[in-house]
Image (cartoon, grey):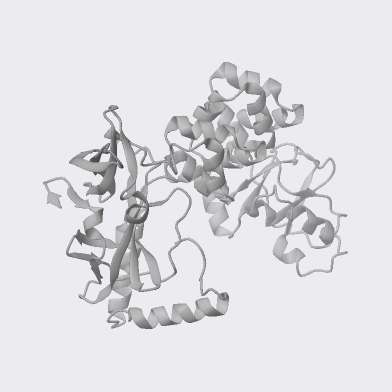
Amino acid sequence: MSTNQETQRVFIGKLGGTTVFDPIGDPVGKVYDVVVLLHRRTPLAIGLVVEVTRTHRVFVPITRVTSMKPDAVITTGLVNLRRFQARPLETCVISELLDREVNFADGSGRGQVMDIAIEQQRDGTWLVTRVHVARLVRGAFRDRLGESLTVDLAAIQGLGVRGTDQAADTLLANLGEMKPPDMAEALHDLPETRMVEVAAQLPDGRLADVLEELEEHDQVKIVSSLEPERVADVLDVMQPDDAADLVAELPRKLAADLLELMEPEEAKDVRRLLAYDEETAGGLMTTEPVVLAPDDSVATMLAHVQRRDIPPALAAMAMICRPPLETPTGKFIGVVHLQRALREPPNTQLGNIIDTDLEGVTPDKTVDYLTRTLATYNLTVLPVVGPNTGSLLGAVSVDDVLDHLLPEDWRWDDRAAVEAAAVAEAEAAAEADGANGEDVAALLASDDAEGANASPSGETGGGH
């Protein structure tokens, strides 16, 4: 390990078997491996695999490591004892990369990975920066190791075959059935060309879900790379408010062409939303809340809110209106809360359980007003009503308001500060209670017992 004023460098191979201690000096386990994300634009170390017993390994986020040296690793002492299982796109350095055959980027031959270095940056993150590699020299019967040297990560090809070098369809298979936000994060971390290539192979519905979770820059890059007809099909299945937000970020001519290619009814909704200021209820609302008539039954409402295309926030409430029931509707009457509907017989008419106290907001209401109203009345959705017609125009959900209030890059912002604050709070609470720390062996025994009850193999669940 070498150190300078800005960074601390650690070679991962030297960490293997190093004892991990909690803050008071008690051993937690030994370093078994280091988990990295090589597919990122800036390859990153995210945590340690710690062997707490011979058969039980756990994941310790690198944000919980306060000191990392070849002779000792010190953590905060807060260890999640769920068994470690690598997620898609994660790579374990010691078990997967050491001894791997690679190529030199300058074409000077092949080599074998002997070690990999990570360096701590000023912001606390650990980047994968250097590779210690031995040149492979062709012999009479087999290759032998020759000169060894330490080079920048960019000087080596073949390390990231699981992530950046594999075919897009193979990468999609590795991503599996990730939820849209998780897949969006995985795509965001890919180099731009790979992100676009993988996104292009997603089915329309899946791509629509993922686009709704991506930041605007990534959305535009993906959409601009696809055929306009394909983009129009994807926009048709997106939530209208998300589709409008995306169209608003595109060059004017492309946006106009896409609106012409979309289904007329879907394009009509998007055009209507684009007419509102994005800082208002009209700019944030969706035109497709759950809308029912007063003579519809509770059973009908329950069938509607169970639809997979209805977001959870919108499913918490049905808007009761006079026909027509497509926005803009006839006169808005009130709402029926899902919780109230669940307490009623299935054949109960919704008109008998309407909450008429919840007044709709007009489309010009500001984000601050919406935030205060949602918080004051503990709501997840607000109806948006025309100021003159009294018809329902749409609905604003709490997730759209939150998404607007948070910074643009909130999905990808480094979580280290948040996690560190949570750890500090937990440690302070433990200290206040007079706690002296958990007995790892006792917790592990409890964890294993629960796992044995959960499945014959004793696994307690995948991931970390």
Q: Is residue 9 visible?
A: yes
Point out residue 309 in the picture as x, y percentages from the top left corner: 70, 47
In the shown orientation, is residue 24 left or right of residue 224? left
Q: Nearer the viewer, residue 349 or 414?
A: 414
How far across and how far down the image is residue 303, in percent?
A: 79, 56
- The image shows a total of numbered marks equal to 0
In the foreground, 193 or 234: 193
The residue positioned farthest toward the top in the image shown: 253
Q: Residue at x 38, y 68 (%)?
A: 57
Residue appearing at x 66%, y 36% in the figure: 204
Q: Is residue 424 left or right of residue 214?
A: left
Q: Position of residue 364 (x, y in %)?
A: 59, 37
The outermost residue toward the front is 140
Q: Which quadrant would residue 165 be assigned to in this image?
A: top left
In this rendering, is residue 99 above or below 440? Answer: above
Left or right: where does residue 69 sit relative to residue 62? left
**Quarter-wise, where is residue 295 in the image?**
bottom right
Name the image quarter holding the C terminus: bottom left
Q: Is residue 159 above or below residue 398?
A: above
Give coordinates of residue 305: x percent, y percent: 74, 54
Name the quadrant containing residue 31: bottom left
Placement of 79 over or under 288, stated as above or below: below
Q: Nearer the viewer, residue 27 or 288?
A: 27
Measuring 32% from the left and 55% from the top, which residue is drawn there?
94
Residue at the image point whose x is 25% and y is 55% from the top: 13
Would you say residue 404 is visible in this rendering?
A: no
